[in-house]
Image (cartoon, grey):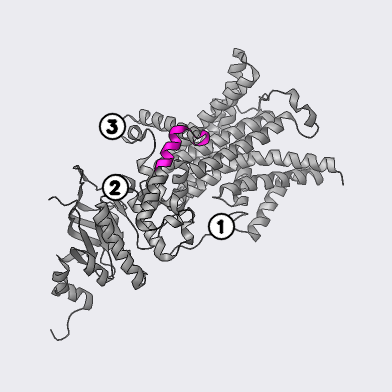
Amino acid sequence: MDWGYFKELLMGGVVKGSIYALIALGYTMVYGIIELINFAHGEIYMIGAFTALIAAGVLTVAGFPAWSILILASAAAVVWSASYGYTVEKIAYRPLRGAPRLSPLISALGMSIFLQNYVLLAQTSNFMPFKNLFPEEGFLENISEVLSATEVIIIFTSAVVMILLSLFIKYSTTGKAMRATAQDRNMAMLVGVNVDKVISATFIIGSSLAAVGAVLIASNMGQINFFIGFIVGLKAFTAAVLGGIGSIPGAMLGGLVLGCTESFGTGYVSSDYEDVFAFTLLVLILIFRPAGLLGKSDIQKV
Amino acid sequence: MKPILDVKNLTMDFGGLRALDSLDIDVRPGEIAALIGPNGAGKTTFFNCVTGMYNPTQGDVLVNSPSGYSTRLNGLKPNKVTERGLARTFQNIRLFQNMTVLENVMIGRHCHSGAGHEIIMDPDNSPVKRMAASAFFGGMEIAATLLKGKRFKEREQETVQYSYKVLEKVGLEKFANNFAKNLPYGLQRRLEIARAMATEPFLLLLDEPAAGMNPQETKELDDLIQRIRDKEGISILLIEHDMRLVMSISQRIFVMDYGKKIAQGTPGEIRTNDAVIKAYLGEDIDA
């Protein structure tokens, strides 16, 4: 067996997987709290990529140094995506809070189509080249055989972001309120939690993570268009379901498992079947563990 | 003295069903009052109307807090009702099972912590201002949690200390770091009361606190409720089927049947009230 090749595939899978995980977190957090599959989440990610592209373009023309472009463009993407996430929840989901569960789902699909077409009209239908925002750094040379600098940054950034998120959920007041809301929304209200604010915070955090993922993935892929949100969103959603939707560690694990499966599948069998591997894995896991890897099966409430 | 909870002419319809029919109930400061009645009489619906879970069809729910302000609670969301000094527990246990005992109580402190709270909550401020404040303080909170800023630490410390004190009051401090789901039943009930107390209410609404408890646990609960009233100055309105508990601790009792109040009075008066006996036991055949 060729270990070098194996390592390469493994690292490729981890890179891919950590980005899936970042975006899957948005799905899983929203599902955990309001039991809605936010289909517009992929579009929020796409908007993040476009924002970063535009911001980076402007900053490059203005002559900023490479690292500051990366940071400022990411910040712009995060802020812009977060405000989109917040607004989408406010206008498309909040009025349907008490409605049957299918209604917000349809609303989510509508929002997704709307945002895609809005970007299509406002921007372009062509693929836009996305300049790699990560400057090539000398200190990464000694591992460049296995991983490019971009990939190292991707893994590092997603790991840091996920650790920060876990700490936030565990220790902050808002994090506690989120967990309480996820477990019993009415009871959370009765102990004084402003549930509307908690839900908004969830959307803001989820969208910010998607924007971070967008900057990372676009830098790695090198091009974006208005439709990228769909397939990435679908993959991230798969990762969330795989790990057990509603569970935050589940989304992280699901992302990595999915990324590695795709990477090994394409590397050892054929790259034509990338998506086949991803979704076969999903089907298999759902057959044997319907609640996902780390999901808990619903206990019937009395 | 003004009653702290003054419910007037409260009516609640579900479609064609009148669940509550012009109900008048009041709770006086420092009182333990009980609400009894056969199953399906509308007792829990009454609690739901008072705490903002339902929006009543008609009538007024007024509170006069000991600190002097009066508000009408109709149509307020549950968290706003809690902010105004009412707290409740449920018939079935509704703890946050996957959080620790301490965290459960800390959540109860939620509405009393948080920087920028006043700006964000004040409906007089413009939406833009509230949103900006919300984003700003939200961001600050994230930063503070992650960097463990000094003020954040102090506030956190304060919340933890306060929550411990609340746990001591109900005798749960030993279990602070256990998961709520691992507590025995009787203690889970106590934790529910502790969590409600952490919101600093002046009126506590207890929905069948003794349900499923053995006589020993009920006796302890009896003591706990009296202690909450005497030591904390919290008035209590409870729904309960355990008549021994009701008769021994409450000053006044309200009796409901089919959504209507059929009697009110001291335990002695209720015990001999014909309408109450009829509601519970049915009509005498000979009569």
Figure quadrant of residue A121:
top right
Residue at 37%, 48% (x, y): give it: A189
Q: Can residue B36 be seen? A: no
Instruction: Tell me how far mark 2 sits from mark 1, CA to CA.
Output: 33 Å
Left or right: where A200 falls relative to A283:
left
> In terms of sequence position, does the residue under pointer 3 or pointer 2 come before the other?
2
Q: Can residue B40 be seen? A: yes
Q: Is residue B33 above or below residue A234?
A: below
Which subunit holds the residue at mark 2?
B
10 Å neighbourhood of mark 2: few (<14), some, or many (≥20)?
many
> Which residue in the protein does label 3 denote?
B124
Residue at 55%, 46% (x, y): give it: A28
For the C terminus of chain A, the quadrant is bottom left
Mark linked to residue A296: 1
User: Which range is magenta?
Assistant: B145-158
Q: Is residue A34 above or below residue B209?
A: above
Q: Amino acid at mark 2?
A: Val
Mark linked to residue A83: none
> Which residue in the protein does label 2 denote?
B81
